[in-house]
Image (cartoon, rainbow, N blue to C red):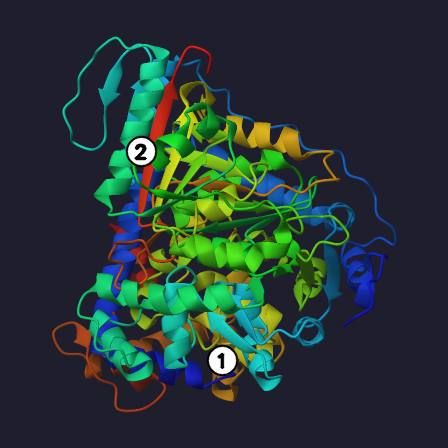
Amino acid sequence: MANPDLTQRSHDALENTVLQGALKAATTTFIERRRDAITSIADWEGLRQRARQVKEHTINNLDFYLEQVVQKVEGHGGKVFWARTGDDVSRYIIELAHARGVKSVVKSKSMATEEIELNHALEAAGVRPIETDLGEYIIQLAQEKPSHIIVPAIHKTRGQIADLFEEKLREGRPNEVAEITAMARKRLRHEFLSAEMGITGANFLIAETGTVVLVENEGNIRLSTQVPKIHVAVVGIEKVIPRFDDLSVFLRLLPRSGTGQKQTAYVSFLNGPRQAAPESAFEFHLVLMDNGRTRILADEQMRESLYCIRCGACLNVCPVYQKIGGQAYGWIYPGPIGAVISPQLQSLGQSGDLPFASSLCGACRTACPVDINLPDLLLALRARAKESGAGRKLSESIAMRSVAFAAKRPRLFAFAGKVMRSFARLLSRDEKIKSVPFPPLSGWTRYRDLPAPQSSSFRARWKKHLDE
Amino acid sequence: MSKANPTVNQNGVLDNVRRALGRSSTVPPIPLDPFIEPSAKTDIGELVERFTEEATAVRARVYYMSDKLQLVAGDGEQSGTERIDKLKLVGQVGARVAEICRSVGATEVALSDSALIAEMNLQEQLGTQGFSIFIPDAVSSAHEQTAARLAKCDVGLTAADYAIAETGTIVLSSDEPNALLVSLLPAVHIALVRSSQIAASLDEVISKIGKERIGRLDSSPSVTLITGPSRTSDVELVLSIGVHGPKELHVIVIDWWHS
């Protein structure tokens, strides 16, 4: 495979008993909460299909709706910046911060800014970024990467977090979860009141009104957008929806799919700077980010991966994510959706092994609130990885050619089958092959048993059946 | 600082979008048919009941106060009914607010500039009960000082524009100066809402907000939906209340004849 690290990272995750316990508890709880929450919607399937239809329509007319967004936001007195790359985003924000004398920035959880590693760029430019979502704050203190889209520090226990707070904050060791929360509240309250700029992402961007919609539970997004005078929203171009009236479909789907809530504690609708008068000290900047999205848009087969609303439901139900967790995926987007978008936003060479980390069971598609056909996208990406040579192996290629050669020659096929059957039965005990001493089969039997083959072929038995 | 560019196409992103869609200029689409779920007509009593049930489930405390009868719900106190007049209602709302403030040991209470709060004469009532009152200035020049001062207030009192019964949500907007900050920075938030402002569903309220926003390019009000107090489950998925926003949310539903 292109990146041998995935295997190693998965091994590490499987051997980490703390992580295994945390993953099991978290994914089980999320699945139960989601299941309960969707029962409050009479026609969940209808809602999903409507959401998909809205996304499909918007993505297929993205140029029109983006133009509308820009016109509305500028009309409200906001500034719009188009960023082709992550570097464009960072450069714009750093220039703005320097021009306004910004020393510290409060940030709310945003996958877009994680994607472009904005924090590194800000730090390098002498601007201090402070993550304010509790989970992100923990991750920032620990200098790690998030392991879940909704709960970034899901891989950490309260004991580990207590140790981390004791070491980094030097205010004693918080014993309860409530004490951890209180300690973070106190620290971050001070940061909110002194930061000169707030940076957020957006869950939705309404074209008709130029409104940024932000969904959250903690209140850190409200504080980041309402307290500092400058608010910068970094938004992937795929986040647009056409009208205000289209929003309620998504506000019903997102919290139920993500956390199993009917509604999150807060949903904010922001329309440009708080006071639009020209002399106003308030500023609103909308950064519309491409960073590989137009490449996905141009690819009709993959286009629907842009429908994702980042709810995290596909992670929780995925048997692979349940075992290896988010960090093993190697980048910031984990789970089935991560396995689909990471190789596209990065490259097949960088993360082309991710589509292979799936059992193709289809649970992700069933859970997806916009019905993205994740299994088909994963299969297509596997095929591309093989075609591009990124995931091709000589031995695999020889084996496949040999099978193809034999399959076209019935007598050879029957003979080869007979030889292999006899050979396999030699290796089996109690109708199972428990260990093969040579590769590549030893790779399989290291972790699982292989059922022993029948003593005669299906064709032989079928023939016998017809004769009887 | 990059120069303000009035064109909509810095860095060629929009060109790339069009190219990806296989065209060289934008083609306006045929809009999708609207999709608003029809909501069953419900009477105010049912809406109040549903709102109370849902808001209580997410740990808000709801009090229903009427000039016809008085019920206490959501906080486990005894309920009772009695006929009261309008002046008495104003007094009772004041007493209820004062009681909540005392229960959290408040000394300073922030009030947003709202018609309903004025109508309930709360500035005077709370003042005579010994609370110091802070009403933030609508002027932006004092923004930092306002925020710092509000963070020191114990209670923030606002009036909601709407409420949503199906999720126990209240809706605040910046049409009311500083309401969003008053509802956010103090550790306890008390919101007043008229029973007639409770809508059955999210769709209804979204549709109303949308209509108010469209075509209002001169002003840019923000709106926030609030459902229960601030919360997080970021540590081991254990629910923890009051992480960055208010630790308590009290909603007083006022049902009086000219509401």
From the viewer's perspective, is residue A136 above or below residue B148?
below
From the viewer's perspective, is residue A13 above or below residue A152?
below
**Chain of the residue on which disc 1 is drawn:** A
Q: Which mark is residue A256?
A: none
Residue at the left extreme?
A430
**Chain of the residue on which disc 2 is drawn:** B
Q: Count residues near mark 2 (Cα–Cα under 10 Å), then give few for <14, some for 14-19, many for 20+.
A: many
Q: Which residue is mark 1?
A: A402
Element under disc 2: helix
Residue at the bottom extreme?
A438
Q: Are marks 2 and 1 on the same chain?
A: no
From the viewer's perspective, is residue B141 above or below residue B104?
below
Q: Nearer the viewer, mark 2 or mark 1?
A: 2
- Tell me if B25 is positioned left or right of A105 in this view: right
Q: Count residues near mark 1 (Cα–Cα under 10 Å), then give few for <14, some for 14-19, many for 20+.
A: few
Residue B138: image quadrant is top right
> How many angstroms separate mark 2 from mark 1 (CA)?
82 Å
Q: Position of residue A123 (x, y in %)?
A: 56, 82
Residue B193: image quadrant is top left
Q: Name the amino acid, label 2.
A: Val
Q: Which mark is residue B97?
A: 2
Q: Name the amino acid, label 1.
A: Ser
Q: Nearer the viewer, residue A293 or B91?
A: B91
**Residue lying at 75% horizontally and 54% vertically, measured from the top left:** A279
Q: Position of residue B233 (x, y in %)?
A: 30, 57
**Residue lying at 62% horizontally and 84% vertically, measured from the top left:** A125
- The answer to whether residue B7 of the structure is visible from this angle is yes
Q: Position of residue A148 (x, y in %)?
A: 39, 65
Q: Is mark 2 in CB contact (under 8 Å) with mark 1?
A: no
- The answer to whether residue A444 of the structure is visible from this angle is no
**Residue lying at 30% horizontally and 71% vertically, measured from the top left:** A155
Residue B35: image quadrant is top right
